[in-house]
Amino acid sequence: MRGRLQAVTDREFDRVIEASSVPVLVKFWKPGCGHCQALAKELELLQQELGERVLILAMNVDEEFQIPAELEISSLPALALYRDGAFVKFIGGLGKKAELLKQLEREVGR
């Protein structure tokens, strides 16, 4: 499994979310955000552990504005969970891999 998270843009966001047959976790971040960088490492480990059971994407809010505005994201990093093409909930954004996995287990295990 790749180490880096797949980047997603405003333009392709809806298509990618709706086409996914697995839950999608989207990390909203920006360059220079230390917490965002730390979370990226944890999410890369989580993606490796979960493999094909979840898709983890990353959206740079300095480059993409529409989706973060629609979700009213006001602090970073932010994690949004989608299932069957629809927003489910926000997930606590500063956790370690084990904490994030625990929060995702119900969604991913379905």
Image (spheres, grey):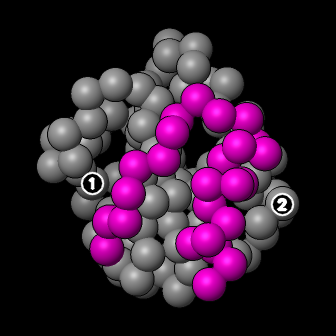
Quadrant location of the C terminus in the rendered image? bottom right
Residue at the disc numbered 2 = 49
Q: Position of residue 47 (x, y in %)?
A: 73, 57
Alpha carbons under labels 2 and 1: distance apart = 27 Å
Q: Is residue 19 visible?
A: yes
Residue 15 is a magenta residue: no
Residue interval drawn in magenta: 86-110
Front in this rendered view, residue 52 or 95: 95
Q: Report helix, strand or loop for mark 2.
A: helix
Answer left or right for 68 relative to 109: left
Amino acid identity at mark 2:
Glu
**Residue 104, magenta (yes or no):** yes
Q: Is residue 94 above or below residue 22?
A: above
The answer to whether residue 35 is left or right of residue 1 is left
Mark before the other along the chain sequence, 2 or 1: 1
Label 1 crowd (10 A; few <14 / some 14-19 / many >=20) = some
Residue at the spot 35% in from the left edge and 78% down from the top edge: 85
User: Quadrant of residue 6 in the image?
Assistant: bottom right
Question: Which image quarter is the N terminus in?
Answer: bottom right
**Residue 57 point in image, percent of width and height:** 52, 55
Q: Secondary structure at mark 1?
A: helix
Q: Which residue is mark 1?
A: 10
Q: Residue at x 56, y 80 (%)?
A: 22
